[in-house]
Image: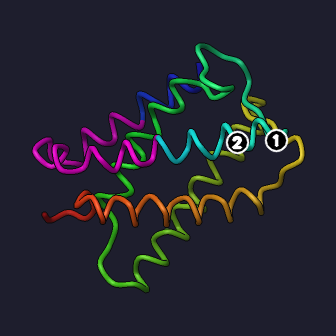
Amino acid sequence: MPWVVLFFVAWLVVLFLIPVQKLKRLWPAGLVGLAAVYAIDSTFIGLGAYSYSSAGPALSGIPVFYLLSIVAGSILLAYFRPNGSWKQLLFVLGMALGFLLIETAMVALRYFHYLSWSTGRSFLLDVAGFIMVLWLAEKAGAAGKEP
């Protein structure tokens, strides 16, 4: 159930904050984020670093509604990416901290489990993942508020 709630909240935020006509340009960022999270999470789940509670349909141990919420989150990440390298660095660090807070809540609620993992590793992985997603989104012309 929490993954379904996260899915709906993420997509409501996208529809509320991003003009619909911009979504046509931004959807590749969502696919990049989806591919990145699937690759990263399925690898680390396979290595026994962490796991998700089995609540609803899952793909390689990852809740499907969580994966679909990542599409929305990646679109938001790409849309609000600021110009300028220092601003982008601060943006990525802030977003990684925000994502870590969500993860910490999911750990406390027992929907996500650290097996041989830590919040520090999650933060570093989030930073690296966000940098990768933003870089690929920029290459695809799917980042920023203006075309």
- Which secondary structure class fits the magenta region best? helix
Residue located farthest toward the top when viewing the structure as drawn: 56
Count of numbered badges drawn on the protein? 2
Q: Position of residue 31 (x, y in %)?
A: 37, 42
Residue visible at 28% across and 61% down?
143
Residue visible at 89% across and 47% down?
116
Mark 1 = which residue?
47
Q: Element at badge 2?
A: helix
Q: Element at badge 1?
A: loop
Where residue 79 sits, quadrant-wise, is: bottom left
Q: Position of residue 14 (x, y in %)?
A: 30, 42
Q: How is the image coloured?
A: rainbow
Residue visible at 36% across and 44% down?
30
**47 displayed left or right of 31:** right
Q: Mark 2 packing: few (<14 Cα in 10 Å), some, or many (20+)? A: few
Highlighted range, magenta: 10-34
Mark 2 = which residue?
43
Residue kind at label 2, given as amino acid type: Thr
CB-based contact (under 8 Å), mark 2 and mark 1: yes
Q: Mark 1 packing: few (<14 Cα in 10 Å), some, or many (20+)? A: few
Camera-side residue of 57 and 16: 57
